[in-house]
Amino acid sequence: MTEKKKKSVCVFCGAQNKVPRIHLDMGKELGKRMAKNNISLVYGGGDCGIMGAVANAVMASGGWVTGVFPESLRNIENEHQNLSKIIIVDTMHTRKELMYNKSDMFVILPGGFGTMDEMFEILTWKQLLLHNKPIVIFNHEGYWDHLIALMENIIDKGFAMMGTKELYDVVTSLDELMEYMHNHPKAGETGGLAPVLVN
């Protein structure tokens, strides 16, 4: 599979191996389905946790994976050595900027503080009209229940506008997630999808 003319989905997720097996298995199944459905993966370039599970499954199923890995992380974890394409960047900020610009939509899987950092930044950019790409939270096995409740409380209390709820979607099954990916066009196929802009 080549990189060109594929729908590119950026996946934010955890990079820890010591997490419930059910989440790692979900990552493997998602990767298989993405490759089968001709959807390429853009992600943080690691080889561990759900992050590695998704990437390895896409590769094993003949799909295309672009990893973006910052040099500063090399003291903490290793970049994946067997991807379709690995891009080494200087900083975490550059990593996120490149991931955002290479993607047609964003999927949030179970993860930790880094996953939330990425999610809230891309949500904020959408709120500021810097892009209009789809964002979907996969609330697998209720993992994000408390975060979703917090976000709704922020909106209900007036710390964010009611329209903020329109910036993202929530799904609870792989079938729903794959349908979501299919039903949203690639960037550039409609006037409503613009590239991410950064300073």
Image (cartoon, grey):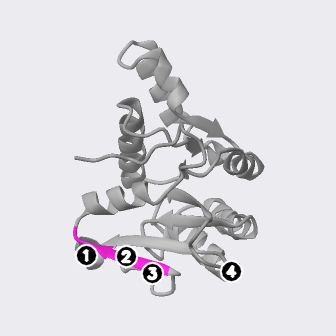
Mark 3 — residue? 80
Residues at marks 3 and 4, CA–CA distance in whole angstroms: 16 Å
Instruction: For the residues labelled 3 and 4, say whether their Cβ atoms are less than 8 Å apart.
Output: no
Q: Secondary structure at mark 4?
A: loop
- Sequence-wise first label, 1 or 3: 1
Residue 97: x %, y % from top left: 33, 56
Mark 4 — residue? 62
Which residue occupies the foreground of this view, 64 or 48? 64
Residue type at mark 1 is Glu
Q: Secondary structure at mark 1?
A: helix
- Residue 163 is inside the magenta segment: no
Q: Residue at x 67, y 50 (%)?
A: 181
- Sequence-wise first label, 4 or 2: 4
Residues at marks 2 and 1, CA–CA distance in whole angstroms: 10 Å
Say whether residue 161 is left or right of residue 136. left
Q: Is residue 35 above or below residue 184?
A: below
Instruction: For the residues labelled 1 and 3, say whether their Cβ atoms are less than 8 Å apart.
Output: no
Mark 1 — residue? 71
Whether residue 46 appears in this view of the structure is yes
**Which label sits in the foreground, 3 or 4?**
4
Say whether residue 73 is left or right of residue 138. left
Mark 2 — residue? 87
Q: Report the predominant secondary structure element of the magenta stretch.
A: strand
Instruction: For the residues labelled 3 and 2, say whether their Cβ atoms are less than 8 Å apart.
Output: no
**Image quadrant in which the N terminus is located:** bottom right
**Rendering quarter of residue 129:** top left
Q: Residue at x 52, y 32 (%)?
A: 148
Q: Residue at x 50, y 65 (%)?
A: 42
Residue type at mark 3 is His
- Sequence-wise first label, 3 or 4: 4
